[in-house]
Amino acid sequence: MSCPGSAHPRSRIGCASTGLPPDRGLFGGPGVGGREPGQNGVVMTDAPSAEERLRTYRQTGDRAIRNRVVEEHMWLATTLAREFHRGSEPLADLVQVAAMGVVKAAERFDPDYGASFTSFAAVTIRGELRRHYRDHGWTMRVPRRLQELRAEVRSAVDTLAMRNGRSPRVPEIAAYLHVATDEVIDALCADENYRPLSLEERTGDGPTLGEQTGVNEPSYALVEADEAFSSVVRLCPARLQRLLHLRYVEGLTQAEIAAEVGISQVHVSRLLHRAHRQLRAQLDTPDGMARAQAG
């Protein structure tokens, strides 16, 4: 079913995309087609072109004229949004971006330049959609050149696959685009970063990716044990602390410790055993562990 008063064969797309009644427009004016019904319901057919109305808008600043032209070209916004729609990007968001492109095109269009408004609007809309993907589509930020080359590589892959009847190789893509092979590889790698999988993603009915890639780090327990042990060592007398430091931090033998502190090796052995008993007693009691954890 087409919209009443619609001159363009694609205008019924515009009505479907806006969800408006066929006799009302996006900004409260007449419906798509931009012409008011005449007497006895007859639609006037002598409406000026979009270029002529935008010339009037530039002279008068009447936004109602601009809004009517935008409504007439909503079909173009919807068509190009569908053309750019891929992946998980919501189509409704792309239609909004494209609609803003129509508004910007209406604001910037110069009737004296000689181009048709439809052609000018299509270029503007495509630019807005590309900018949307560049600035808001990437989960991980990559250089702009890689973003642009990624799109060129995807297009080249489709073209070469149809031409050769098989998937193209990297050197073939590079030769087709006249770029280095490493650049093609970088673009293919960037393609994987456009929307990476979440660690909460499940593989079928199995565990999440995070559960598959995560491991229990044993060093965490060692860090906690080291901190608890250091706290307990600080409860020992200074002399025993020094012996423990020489033995277990600097790695000296009992004979070397004896020479360092000026006592016999037998005495060093007795002092170390005494330190071991005190440390074990502290760590085996709840109060000692509490003091160790408190630091």
Image: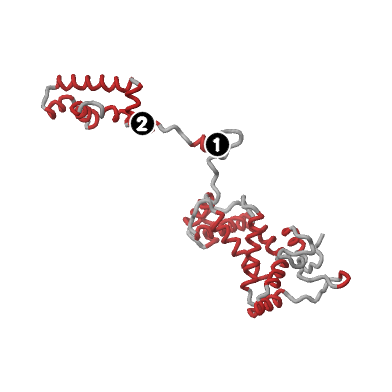
Label 2 sits on a secondary structure element that is helix
Q: Quadrant of residue 257?
A: top left
Q: Nearer the viewer, residue 35 or 286?
A: 286
The image position of residue 242, as x and y in percent, is 19, 29
The image position of residue 247, as x and y in percent, is 21, 28
Say whether residue 114 is visible. no
View extreme (left): residue = 262
Q: Quadrant of residue 68?
A: bottom right
The quarter in which the N terminus is drawn is bottom right
Residue type at mark 2 is: Glu
Residue under the image location 22 percent in, 20 percent down: 274
Depth-wise, is mark 2 or mark 1 nearer the camera? Answer: 2
* Mark 2–mark 1 distance (CA, rounded to whole Å): 28 Å
Q: Quadrant of residue 71?
A: bottom right
- Mark 1 or mark 2, which is nearer the start of the sequence? 1
Q: Give the number of callouts.
A: 2
* Residue 274, numbered circle: none
The image position of residue 39, as x and y in percent, is 87, 72
Q: Residues within 10 Å of mark 1 (few under 14, many from 20)?
A: some
Q: Nearer the viewer, residue 15 or 188?
A: 15
Residue type at mark 1 is: Thr
Residue under the image location 82 percent in, 73 percent down: 44
The image position of residue 20, as x and y in percent, is 75, 60
**Disc 2: which residue:** 224
**Disc 1: which residue:** 208
